[in-house]
Image (cartoon, rainbow, N blue to C red):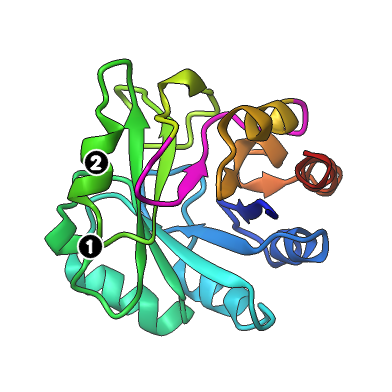
Amino acid sequence: MTVRVKVCGITRGEDAQAAIRYGADAVGFVFWPHSARYIDLAVAAKITASVPPFIVSVGVYVDPEVAWVEETIRVARLSLLQFHGDETPEFCNQFSLPYIKAIRVKSDTDLLQYAKRYRSASGLLLDAYAAEMPGGTGHTFDWQLIPSQLSLPLILSGGLNPDNVVSAIQQTKPWAVDVSSGVEASKGVKDEKKIFAFMQGVKQS
């Protein structure tokens, strides 16, 4: 089965187009103001206007206000929501779009219970835990903590890059992988060569 790819933390139109050109299935826009990869809504809307059919535009949030999610959906014409905070299933499920729930994995994280609690989600995105950051740490976590059978599609995130993506996919057999800092030249600025190398790794896996 083909592993899907989301390139997240897009802040520039040329980076979105490079990701799409090399085969990414989704591009992600961070609407959490405290992120180094935060994107202005008007800029995001300009980029998503040029996203071709069948490519998913994802809005990324951390404990947002309802009105902010609704505004970004409308203005940026999003097709999927991604929640990285302490949002409840009821909160995530109230919008007009499907959602995925990010879980920051620690040694005692019960992923089976999370999958059960967020059964209305389209998938679980598993990321590395860092006390001071809700995501985008650039670090991997222990992939052996992932149960062999999750009731929701697995989206692997956290520290993925062109050098480790083949091993990551072979070990975890995810539905999709999510990359941000691993294909950057600097925070919020993607490196086209790294995107290409990452996509080649996904295809080889």
Residue type at mark 1? Cys
User: The N terminus appears in which quarter of the rendering?
Assistant: bottom right
Residue type at mark 2? Tyr
Stretch of the chain drawn in magenta? 149-163
> Toward the viewer: 89 or 61?
89
**Residue at 49 percent of width and 75 percent of height:** 42
Residue density around tag 2, few if under 14, some if 14–19, many if 20 or more, within 10 Å:
some
Q: Is residue 82 left or right of residue 25?
A: left
- Residue, disc 1: 92
Judge whether residue 186 can be spotted in this image: yes
Q: Is residue 140 left or right of residue 205?
A: left
In percent of width and height, residue 126 lies at: 42, 37
Residue density around tag 1, few if under 14, some if 14–19, many if 20 or more, within 10 Å:
many
The quadrant holding residue 66 is bottom left
The quadrant holding residue 64 is bottom left
39 up-or-down from 140: above or below: below
Residue 15 within the magenta-colored segment of the rendering: no
Provide the secondary structure element on which disc 2 rests: helix
- Residue, disc 2: 114
**Residue at 25 percent of width and 56 percent of height:** 119
In percent of width and height, residue 100 lies at: 37, 57
96 up-or-down from 195: above or below: below
**Residue at 52 percent of width and 32 percent of height:** 158
